[in-house]
Structure formats: structure tokens, C-alpha cells
Amino acid sequence: MQKFLFVLFILQISFTKAQDHSASVQVQSFSLEAPQLHTTKTIRLYLPKDYTTSQKKYPVIYMPDGQNLFDIKTAYLGEWKIDETLDRLNAQVIVVGIDHGGDKRLEELTPFTNAKYGGGKGDLYLEFLVNTLKPYIDSHYRTKTNAKNTALFGSSLGGLIAFYASLKYPEIYGKVGCFSPAFWINRDPLKALMEQTPTYTSRIYLLCGDQEGDDAMETDMHTIENWINTRRCSCKMKNKSVIIPGGQHNEKLWSEQFEKAYLWLF
């Protein structure tokens, strides 16, 4: 039953509708063609409070499921409150939220096809992020463009694609946030890719709750962390794994834990 509810959440979140609404004066939204996916994406952009009064360059966090980041009116089951959190911290970072593709969400955020649920267009999604979105953001906003200052941060399927991106594009994504990562949906092909990957260099924050509805999530997360530790090229601590007692697979957990993850990553 718990597994069923977890899968139901994964699928239902795909059908939330995007609305053009800004919850903060620093949050903007615009449309950008995504030729790799044959669609147009709504992009939600958070700018630091001092962006317009300074000439500084800023790190950038890219985040899937942009509908759920800034505004309760566009979120599925609660928002992450990214803008409120970063405003309170006076955070010096730009956040780029990419709206999910509705009923195409599972396709876009899974690197490999699942025999039961389909999907498998994650490479095309990342090609959009790397070859279209990032160049656009870097050319239109004052950003620090190197991997040390570029993060990909997501939850559930977004956590899966974030980790996958760190394997495929370590020269792009030097920091990764994986909340409640849905490794289970691509477990075997992901494991095969990891076995072929000689080193792991990204700084990564892994988190899940112990009441997620998927009994294998904690096991998968520990497996990933243990593998990372065998691939590190230095002895510096660049990965953190957190299990939240009572944490469930929802925006409440992710919103409450985002601040700690952000502060650790940056």
C-alpha cells in the first residue's frame, strides 16, 4: 500500500497546471523554447535582493518542477518557499526553476525507460538545460558560470535527474541536491552507469524521510553514497546523507529541509 501511494504521488504531480504568478518581487517568469523536447518551457527565476543595485556575479541553482518552488497557487501540494527562505538568508544566489512538462514529467526526468512506467528522455531534458537554458541564463544575467558555482537540485524524479546529471555533466554541475530521489525507477541501468564511471567529483546532499512510502529509498540512498565514497578523488568531505524521522514524500519535507541543504552546499 505504501509503495502504491508513493507511485501515485510520482504520477499525480505530473498533472499540475502552470500559472504565471510571482510570489516575490525577485521572482520573474518567462518562456523559453526547448527544441530538444519539442516544446516551450516556463522558466521561473529568483534574483537576490541586491541584484539590481550591485554589479556582482552570482552562483546559480537549477531546479526541476518550477511550479512548486515559489508559489502556493501553482504548486501541487504546497510550495518549497524558496524565495522566502533565500530572502531571509539574504542569499547571494540565483535560482532557475524549470516547469515540469505536465503529463510528460516522468518522460523528462527519467534517464532510462522503465518497463512499467515508460519514460527515458532524461538525456534530452539535460541537453536542454546544458545547451539551451544555461547559455541563455549566463548571457542574460550576471552569473558565475563554472561548475563550482552551478548546482542542480530536485526532489523525487527531480532528485534522480539531478544525480544523473552529475554523472553525465560533472564539468557543469559541481553541486547537487537530491531530496527523496526516486532511484528505484531506474535502479538497474543507473547502477550499470555508475559501475562505468571512474570518478565522482560533485558536492552532493542526499536526503529522504523515513516515512516516504518506499521501503527501498533509504537503502538506495545509502548505496549511492557508498558508491560515491569509492569514487572520490580526494579525502575532502563532499557528500552528506540525511534521514529525517517522520519525513514523508512531499513538499512539506523538502521545504523544511531546503535551508540546511542550501547552506551546506554553498
Image (spheres, rainbow, N blue to C red):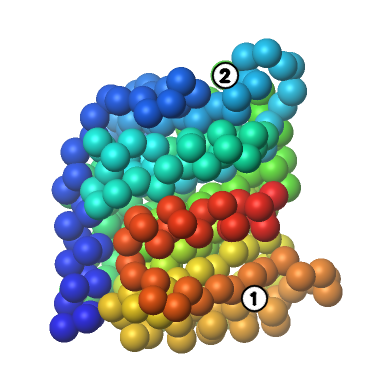
Measure how far apart labels 1 and 2 are at the Cα level: 35 Å
Label 2 belongs to which residue? Answer: 140
Lateral position of residue 179 relative to residue 120, left or right: right
Give the answer, above or below, for where 235 lies relative to 79.
Answer: below
Q: Name the kind of residue labelled 2 in the image.
A: His
In which quadrant of the rendered view does residue 134 lie?
A: top right
Label 1 belongs to which residue? Answer: 228
Q: Quadrant of the N terminus?
A: bottom left
Q: Position of residue 21 (x, y in %)?
A: 30, 25
Identify the element where label 2 is drawn.
Answer: helix
Give the answer, above or below, for where 154 lies relative to 213.
Answer: above
Q: Is residue 139 visible?
A: no
Give the answer, above or below, for where 199 lies relative to 19.
Answer: below
Give the residue displayed 74% in from the left and 17% down from the top: 55
Q: Is residue 14 visible?
A: yes
Q: Name the kind of residue labelled 1 in the image.
A: Ile
Q: Position of residue 162 (x, y in %)?
A: 49, 57
Identity of the residue furthest to the front in this view: 88
Within 10 Å of disc 1 (Cα), the crowding (few <14, some 14-19, many 20+) is some
